[in-house]
Amino acid sequence: MVASDEEQIDRLRDWWSENGRTVIAGLVLGVAALLSWQGWQAWQDNRIASASAAFAQLEQMAARGQGDVVERAEIVATAHRGSSYAALAWLMGAAAAVENNDLATAVAYLEQARESAGREALIATIDLRLARVLWAQGKHQQALDRLAVPPAGFEGLFAELRGDVLADQGDWVAARQAYEQAVATDSGNGLLRMKLDSLPAAKPAAS
């Protein structure tokens, strides 16, 4: 039997009486979640845009040689901690510190950059720079420790720098091995072959 209009209305009223609050609550929660997501997304977009603008200003400052780039880099990196621009700001600050011959600050900034970096390739690049600065400080073993485990794709670069550090120590045997490993990954590198060919006759490292 087909229900009359009044019966359908009564059933609708009964259903709404039992379920209306739940439906409204669900709609409210759904709308709140959507607005919350949109708000978070907008906040993220604004945060990235702000970090990008701050880093661009830092780049301009460094390019023009204006202001204290080391100090400004710390401000930018700290203000935008957690963004990809933080690691880049630390790197730029480290480069400026090296130009100022402030190697201790360069090492500290590079360590911060490493902690902020999320990509393996960027971490590997930072390790190479750290090793170079540590080597410049005369900390040969610390530099070699940074180069001990090269990530995939960076074997040649790590091996070449290991060779440079070992050669500076006078460890011709180990330096030759490192250069040969590097040549194996980049046989067309003329400068690398010159380094290998210029090594003195193999002898143990000086004690």
Image: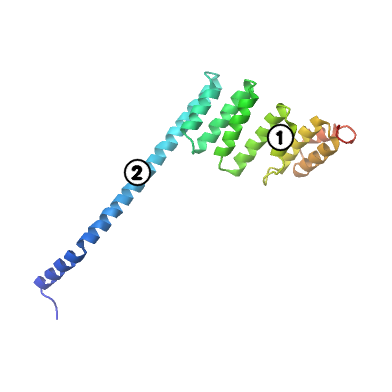
Of the numbered discs in the image, which one, if any, rests on residue 142?
1
Of the two numbered discs 2 and 1 in the rendering, the one whose residue sits closer to the viewer: 1
Which percent across, then down, holds residue 100?
A: 62, 20
The amino acid marked with disc number 1 is Gln
Which percent across, then down, holds residue 127?
A: 65, 37
- Left or right of residue 51, residue 191 in this image: right
Q: Image quadrant of residue 109?
A: top right
Q: Which residue is rendered at x = 68% and y = 42% of the image?
A: 154
Q: Is residue 31 above or below residue 154?
A: below
Q: How many marks?
A: 2
- Left or right of residue 56, residue 110 in this image: right
Of the numbered discs in the image, which one, if any, rests on residue 170?
none
Find disc 2 in the rendering and name its residue. Answer: 39
Give the mark nearer the N terminus: 2 vs 1. Answer: 2
Q: Which residue is rendered at x = 12% and y = 69% of the image?
A: 10
The amino acid marked with disc number 2 is Gly
Which percent across, then down, holds residue 207?
A: 86, 32
For the residue pair 109 and 64, the one nearer the viewer reads as: 109
C-alpha span from label 2 to label 1: 46 Å
